[in-house]
Amino acid sequence: NFFKKLGFKVVDIYKGYQILPQENYGIVLYCAGVTAGFRERPFDVINAHVTNLVNWLTFSDFDKLIYFSSARIYMGNKLGLESVEDFIINRNDTYNQTKILGESICQFSKKNTAILRLSHVIGYDPNSPYFFWNVIRQFCSNSPNVSIDESPQSKRDYIFLEDIFDIIRQI
């Protein structure tokens, strides 16, 4: 809806969509992925993060493709710097392996691509049971105590979905 309100033509593309090679798709936001239950669905993860991406890069015409990746790929990187080329990845971590492979495919593609590494994206949902909104609700209730059920060493940066849309518009 964000882009529709700005006057852009938006085409929702779902799994199994037949790419039309003769059509120019303009700007493709490749945000296909598997988050919930990804450990139990490794082939779905591989298809979403790699196989379908390769099909888009090989068979479609577009002005730019923006690949939504994940900051999770830095979990084993003690420095947390993007400039570090060596990643320590658990060999059983299909999710991170495929996200890194997806990024590599975009970088080596001869087409115009960009990569967004996202983490802790939240939409406006004050009734959500998840961590961020739970803490906000507790704080707003004027309760003398706010319970944060996380390790004191845990650090998270949050970004609102609407801010991501604005970043995409600028790209």
Image (cartoon, rainbow, N blue to C red):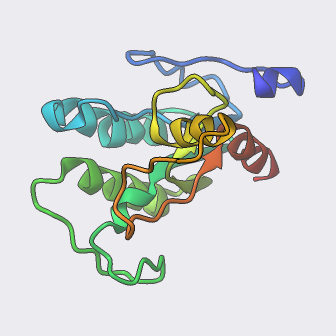
Residue, x 60% and y 23% (percent of image)? 22
Please identify the residue farthest to the left as the structure is shown.
92
Rendering coords of residue 141 (x, y %) = 65, 34
Quadrant of the rendered image containing residue 101: bottom left
**Number of numbered discs visible in the structure rendering:** 0
Rendered location of residue 170, percent (x, y): 81, 51
At 81% across and 20% down in the image, what residue appears?
A: 4
Which sits in the foreground, 159 or 38? 159
31 relative to 75 in the view: left or right: right
Q: Quadrant of the N terminus?
A: top right
Q: Nearer the viewer, residue 126 or 6?
A: 126
Q: Position of residue 7 (x, y in %)?
A: 89, 23
User: Furthest-front residue in view?
Assistant: 144
Say if residue 62 shows up in the picture.
Answer: no
Q: Is residue 129 visible?
A: yes
Q: What residue lies at 36% left-to-right and 81% top-to-bottom?
A: 85
In the image, taking residue 9 as reference, residue 108 lies left or right, namely left
Q: Is residue 155 above or below residue 97?
A: below
- Looking at the image, residue 60 sits to the left or right of residue 45; the answer is right
